Amino acid sequence: MTMGFFGGRAGGIRYDGHRKRPHSMPQTELRSEKIPRRRWTIALLLGIGVLVNYFDRVNLSVSRDALEASFGISAVMFGWLSGAYNWTYMVLQLPSGLLLDRFGVRRVGIVSTVIWSVASFAAAISTGIGSLFGARFLLGIGEAPTFPANSKATGYWFPKNERSLATAMFDSAAKFSSAIGIPVLGLLLLRFGWRWNFAATGIISLLYFALFYAIYRNPSDDKLLTAAEREFIARGGAQPEDRARAAKGAPLIYLLRQRKVWGLALGFASYNYTFYLLLTWLPSYLSSSLRVDLLHSALYTSVPWLFATFTDLVVGGWLVDALIQRGWSATRVRQVVLVGGTIFGLGILGTAHAHNPATALFWISMSIGGLSAASPVGWSIPSLIAPRESVGTLGGILNFCNQLAGIAAPIFTGYIVQATHSFAGAFIGATAFLVLGIAGYVFLLGRIEAIPEPA
């Protein structure tokens, strides 16, 4: 027997290397520091992939003024263009989840990386609004499998009591990319023009393709994974690889009938709405509402994203795993961080009444910092609750709902800004959505425990 899902003690005898331990020894006392760390190389690889993904996404927000000068883009048109990526990304979430469960992380990841690399170069050579929309649609196709794939890979590669930090390593990259990408791409734009923003991300994407192709394998196929680490991962509750079961997994309709799935999806969609509002409009908000010039706007924008990177890694990742490894209730720790972090996200309401950059950055940092602490917990949940070989499908459902919110946020914000000449209404709307998300976590998701296997 293995350890119970929420901290129960296993029966029988445990092994740590070649030493026997009595059945009363808790799982957390296995000496993981003496186990090889191949799994953390995989986590770092996944994090680099997300970093590159989000360079592709923020380069558009940095280029807004330059695109307006080149193509005459209005606030509403920019909102639609910002959401264009999300349309194809959203439509392909469920198919990509099914493909991941059927063909695996490596094969789907290789194809998707090639597609998103081509999309970046296509944006760089676009000649008008139509071709730029086409490039963003293609980018959504290429990047659609990324987060469901990472969630599935983390389930294979990590024991449960290390999964929050492993998830935070790729989830925090989405925030860190904005922290460093916006100022770097802003400087690149000022010196060379907006087309080099997209060309640069295309080159970086190709380099990541070579890295992913060379390194990523599932644990069963990785020749550099030692027997000791393989046993440590399996004993810690990693999702087992089942090649026969992977051909079907849990039916999609079965997962859609689960209230836990809907609670998780609603809560995460509310997070993603605020995330995309800030990802696509924060530089414009600082420059138009608070009269910050382009260079300082790009630099100021990095402040909340750096804070979000910190809370993602330290609170949502390291602290969650540390408390669970010390014997705290796994479900209680994850629930407190998930709900508590989203409550801190309500700080976005304070931005609606900010009149200077310092006040605005304080409230934005509180909001995105809290949401970022909750985010790795949310992304670790599919691998904790999904039936066997269904993590990709559940991740696809989750990210489908995320992208509905991601599409809505920049578009609604564009209409609100054009109609009111203010961002206050956009921040108030994000606050209301977060309240709904908190209710979804509390009343629908409830305990973070496994969904029964379908009959």
Image (cartoon, rainbow, N blue to C red):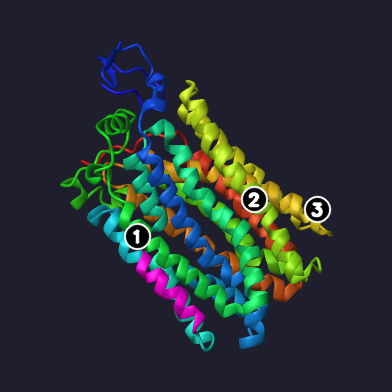
Q: Given the current orientation, which residue lies at the most extreme left position?
A: 244
Q: Given the current orientation, which residue lies at the most extreme right position?
A: 355
Q: Is residue 123 magenta?
A: yes
What is the secondary structure assignment of the residue under circle 2?
A: helix
Q: Position of residue 131 (x, y in %)?
A: 48, 85
Q: Residues within 10 Å of mark 1 (few under 14, many from 20)?
A: many
Residue sitting at x 47%, y 56%: 50
Residue type, mark 2 in image: Leu
Mark with earlier residue (3, 2): 2
Instruction: Say which quarter of the image contains residue 238.
Output: top left
- Tell me the mark number nearer the camera, choosing from 3 and 2: 2
To which residue does mark 3 refer?
359
Q: Is residue 373 magenta?
A: no
The quarter of the picture where the C terminus appears is: top left
- Residue 300 lies, with reference to residue 169, above or below; the image says below
Residue 236 visible? The answer is: yes
Q: Position of residue 151 (x, y in %)?
A: 39, 48
Q: Position of residue 119 (x, y in %)?
A: 43, 74
Q: CA distance from mark 3 to mark 2?
A: 17 Å
To which residue does mark 1 refer?
94
To which residue does mark 2 refer?
306
Position of residue 367 in the picture relative to residue 405 (left or right): right
Residue sitting at x 53%, y 70%: 83
Mark with earlier residue (1, 3): 1
Q: Circles 2 and 1: CB distance less than 8 Å?
A: no
What is the secondary structure assignment of the residue under circle 3?
A: helix
Q: Residues within 10 Å of mark 3 (few under 14, many from 20)?
A: some
The boundaries of the magenta stretch are 113-125
Mark with earlier residue (2, 1): 1
What is the secondary structure assignment of the residue under circle 1?
A: helix
Of 70 and 92, the residue lying toward us: 70
